[in-house]
Image (cartoon, rainbow, N blue to C red):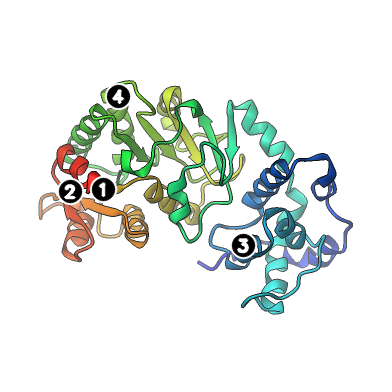
Amino acid sequence: MPAGKNNGGEGELAGHLSRPTHHFSDKKEHHHMNDDNRTARAALARLFEPADPVGRALVAKHGAPDALKIATGAHRAEPFWDVTSEDLTEGLRRWAPRVPGLDPAADLDIIKGLGGGFLTPGDEHWPTGLNDLPDAPYGLWYRGTIDNGIPAPSRSVALTGSRDSTSYGAAVTGDIAYGLAQRGICIISGLAYGIDAHAHRAALAGSCGDGPATIAVLAGGLDRDYPSGNADLAAAIRANGLTLSEQPPGAAPTRARFLDRGRIIAALAGVTCVVEARWRSGALTTAHHAETIARHVAAVPGSIHSANSAGCHRLLKEGGAVLVTDAAELAELLTS
């Protein structure tokens, strides 16, 4: 879906753009460069959708603080590279409805109040695996135990699959996640019901205590564990690991954001393994993201009679995935 198509209220545009500069762009003299960059990126996380190419180009060309000033109408928007004045006009129209709601200082306070924070590229704990993405997040909101860090992709495996998993899928996920955790490998997943939840739980059970057992990447803001039925699981994950999101506090988990979140799961892990998935499953999107950035993709076979394994068989048949049956094979794939 084209970026920004879900924003209403574009008619109010002219009023927003002719306003004086917004409060967060006047304070430059009070901040170190780094604080300025962090605050700007916190605002951009709310202003731009991840796939918005004009927003991404602005940051690449001008840096986050100046990109924010241009996007909010505080600085003139001049065409550059292959970004035309039409592209910029259309972008300004797309972003305008969100500008009045920007308050990065408040967002940073909220995440701090939740015992978390906001990572930006170059920070000590920034996961460098994300730099392999063509559309890397502007920053990463986190809650939990950041002192343990975020393991490198070479020490992490993503396990994912359908929400409506079968007892077979649950058992295999449990065995694999437990076995990987026993080897000190971090399990990355999405906190959803089904395969994701089984993966997180088994990783916690198998954890040998060094570093985070498991990390959950959410599609919405971290002020709300989604789905709420997994709130206890999220709290258990944060005891020695993290919940992460590129979306600021209060952001709703939308269909587009579930699909976007797959690329972060894929980039954090050296291998993405689909344990059980239907023919058209969101888990397959995560696998395709992994393939795009040259990560290993694996799939667990199931019964040919099971619609719940049709997506795994499709990955194997199309040649993008390696067939795996246990934790040892995934651990081996991770080192190759």
Q: How many marks?
A: 4
Answer with mark 4 or mark 3, whichever residue precedes in sequence: 3
Q: Distance between the residues labelled 4 and 3?
A: 39 Å
Three-letter amino acid code at the position of disc 4: Ser
- Neighbour tally class for label 4: few under 14, some 14-19, many 20 plus, Cα within 10 Å: many
Answer with mark 1 or mark 2, whichever residue precedes in sequence: 1
Residue toward you, 317 or 208 = 208
Residue highlighted by disc 4 = 207
* Badge number at residue 166: none
Three-letter amino acid code at the position of disc 1: Cys
Residue at 38%, 41% (x, y): give it.
152
Residue at 25%, 59% (x, y): give it.
279
Question: Do labels 1 and 2 touch, CB within 8 Å?
Answer: yes
Residue 157: % across, % down: 30, 42
Q: Which of marks 3 and 1 is in front?
A: 3
Answer with mark 3 or mark 1, whichever residue precedes in sequence: 3
Q: Distance between the residues labelled 4 and 2?
A: 22 Å
In this rendering, position of residue 212 left or right of residue 183: right
Residue 89 in view, yes or no = yes
Three-letter amino acid code at the position of disc 2: Val
* Badge number at residue 273: 1
Residue highlighted by disc 2 = 300
Residue toward you, 102 or 182 = 182
Q: Distance between the residues labelled 2 and 3?
A: 39 Å
